Amino acid sequence: MSRIETIELKIYHRVVYPTEVMFKWDAVGCSEAILLDLKSRGINLMRVLRVSNGFPTRVYFVCVQQFLNSDLSHVFLKTDKQFFVRFSDMLLQAKPLECQKNLNGEVCKE
């Protein structure tokens, strides 16, 4: 049996801009309908790229179930329930993307 194994892991990728952040919680939200669809398709992990002006892009990882279990929610337009997870509750990628450009097109370095 080999100690190295290649697996195909389905990951939902989401880019989050400053206008999409719920600032009162410093959290990002996702619609309940999208979360349930991801879960039904067997996608359990989300990669969130937080892009902001003047700061390096941050990469976070979070489980779909973390959104569904969250007590932070808000209903938009009376039908779209969104669940939120704080960035501090997500797993932050240790090394920032040094070659990623910010919203002004400048390369950010930490």
Image: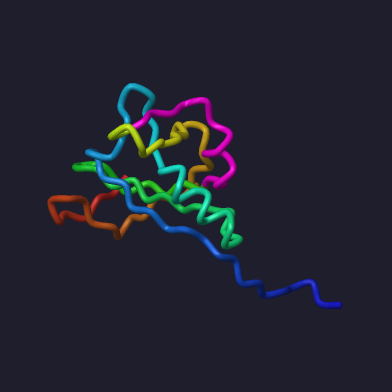
The residue stretch that appears in magenta: 62-75
Tally of marks = 0
Residue 80 sits inside the magenta stretch: no
Please name whichever residue, 21 or 58, is drawn nearer the observer in this view of the structure: 21
Residue sticking out furthest to the left: 104
Residue 48 higher or lower than 24, as above or below: below
Q: Residue at x 16, y 54 (%)?
A: 106
Please name whichever residue, 40 or 17, is drawn nearer the observer in this view of the structure: 40
> Residue 29 location, x and y as percent?
39, 38
Residue sticking out furthest to the right: 1
Quarter of the figure with residue 1: bottom right
Residue 33 higher or lower than 73, as above or below: below
Image-based side of 36 in relation to 8, left or right: left
> Residue 78 location, x and y as percent?
32, 32
Residue 66 sits inside the magenta stretch: yes
Q: Residue at x 28, y 40 (%)?
A: 20
> Residue 59 location, x and y as percent?
42, 49
